[in-house]
Image (cartoon, rainbow, N blue to C red):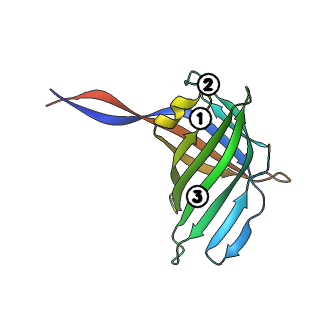
Amino acid sequence: MKLTNFPALVPAFTAQIPINDPLIISSSLLNIPFIANAGTLVSEPGYEPPLEATFIHGSDFIRRDPDGQWVKLDVTSVARDASGAMLRFSYNGVVDMEGDEGKIRFETDAPGLRLLQDKLYVGSGRFIIEEDRPVIVEYKISEVNTRVYALGS
């Protein structure tokens, strides 16, 4: 029997972010502002540390590839949790015909949330479109965790 470490994904958070209409900066660059005080970042049941936060500010810069096959995401935002602690939430990623995925980062001074800064997170997203409502970008965010698995020889 051999032992090796493979990363595993641990469901951590769901982000739901209502967005405004895009601002066209150039033919290859858009900025999509968040609707202030409307989006949420909520931890999955049992995930530590628990988090229930509201996005108070943020936007997504989207840069299109010249061939139109993919776009790059660059998001920076600020969220406030139920205790009033502030949290910087940022992610970047690539969107192609298969969907999108990205790397998520946290930054905060709040003692109960600091450990978020030392973990690696990835996410997968989708758009939620409902008539007469703002478009919502939803991300399912997982912690990348290394566990030991036994492989047969």
Q: Residue at x 60, y 23 (%)?
A: 45
Left/right placement of residue 2 relative to residue 109 reads: left
Instruction: Give the Cα separation between the discs numbered 2 and 3.
Output: 25 Å
Q: Secondary structure at mark 3?
A: strand
Q: Position of residue 121 (x, y in %)?
A: 49, 40
The quarter of the rendered structure image containing the N terminus is top left
Mark 3 or 1: in front is: 3
Q: Secondary structure at mark 2?
A: loop
Q: Quadrant of residue 4?
A: top left
Q: Amino acid at mark 1?
A: Phe
Q: Quadrant of residue 114?
A: top right
- Residue pointed to by mark 3: 74
Q: Please give the label number shown on residue 45.
A: none
Q: N-terminal of the two: label 2 or label 3?
A: 2
Q: How many marks do you count on the picture?
A: 3
Q: Residues within 10 Å of mark 3 (few under 14, many from 20)?
A: some
Q: Residue at x 69, y 73 (%)?
A: 25
